[in-house]
Amino acid sequence: MSRWDQLNIFFKKTGAVVIFGLNALRGRTISSQGAAVGAWNSSNAESLIRYTVKKGYRIHGWELGNELSGNGVGTRVAAGQYASDTKSLQSIVQNVYAGFEAKPQVLAPGGFFDENWFTEFIHKTPQSLQVVTHHIYNLGPGSAGDLIQKILDPSVLDGISQTFKSLQSLLEKSNTPAVAWVGESGGAYNSGHNLVTNAFVFSFWYLDQLGMSASYDTKTYCRQTLIGGNYGLLDTNTFVPNPDYYSALLWHRLMGNKVLSTSFPGTKKLRAYAHCSKKTQGITVLLINLDSNTKVQVRVSTESPGKLSYLNFQGLRGSKASQNVREEYHLTAKDGDLHSKVMLLNGKALSVDSSGNIPALEPITVGSSNPTTVAPLSIVFVHIPGITVPACK
């Protein structure tokens, strides 16, 4: 409990929104087939939740279990039993937080997507679950020698889209108010790979994941990890931000919550996503060039309301100065080295100062009549204030 107290002091100082995962194996026995059977013993979890409320700690959500869905990792729990246990957790939360206007969310199962298992689980938890969480490690083990080839392969990146699509469809067809989250994702399991999952090259995978998951109505994406292993947003020893930290920060500042249907007809190696801009007018486009040799020139057009395709600037009118320019954030690796832990923004290295302050993330301003040039193996965020689509009003 002293450690829980320390953590909650840290959470309060940082303003973190906290989800806490509870042990879902207490009280069960492991069968000869390797499955965990029997009901969840919730007494330990309930005592932690009651202590948390007594101390006035704010927890946004309580998640039941870790990687027990489908075939599980290490062991598994049947979907029907898991649904029953989730109802027990919801009952505890409702009881302990009685009288609280805002109650924490209940999340589950925090495991890998298995369509049959998830279908049964969601069907049996229509009122006791607010968030369906699933995990993604679509690049395989961190020890693999071909991680960079996978990260730069559009077909590998697209492979996980079926999971997002299936879960989105399942939730739409179910009578549940629950929404989809990626509850944990580090790309390559077993702690990632030094100088790959903590280097510039990993932002190709990470930002593509953020764009793709959002396009399938994923509400939250939890990155494994803030710190720890070789896939932390911060260096494990120095706490200095790794490249993906800055990618996450730019996404957070620029990309709004409304997602626009986006396509790029030129090459599969150019990934394109667009959202209504966050806190400002217009749209923000994310362009990811996986090609090591080809520079891509991109023009944006709005073909139909809310639909973007990169063909040309059509119908962009307006005499205001802001509508004739756009802001671009070009991200590249230092010295062109994909293994570099230093990211350049518009040619300038991103690093904290001696006090640990995050640098200003400043764009370059470009005339709207010129195409956006996306260099080989680079990433560009483009904020275009002059494009208005109905979805963004």
Image (cartoon, rainbow, N blue to C red):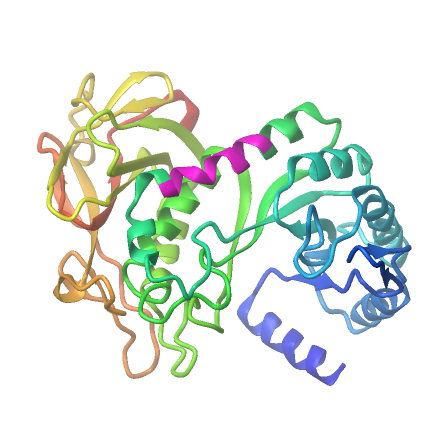
247 and 378: which is toward the camera = 378
The quarter of the image holding the C terminus is top left
Magenta segment's dominant SS is helix
| Residue positioned 60% across, 60% down in the render | 17
Q: Is residue 294 above or below residue 170?
A: below
In this view, the residue farthest toward the front is 32
Look at the image and give the residue range highlighted in magenta.
156-166
The quarter of the image holding the N terminus is bottom right
The image quarter in which residue 272 lies: top left
**Residue 393 visible to an observer of this rendering:** no
**Residue 28 visible to an observer of this rendering:** yes
State yes or no: residue 160 in magenta.
yes
Q: Is residue 330 above or below residue 308?
A: below
| Residue positioned 20% across, 46% down in the render | 328
14 and 181: which is toward the camera = 181
Q: Position of residue 121 (x, y in %)?
A: 76, 39
Left or right: residue 384 compared with residue 346:
right
| Residue positioned 38% across, 22% down in the render | 306
Left or right: residue 14 compared with residue 104:
left
Q: Position of residue 124 (x, y in %)?
A: 82, 36
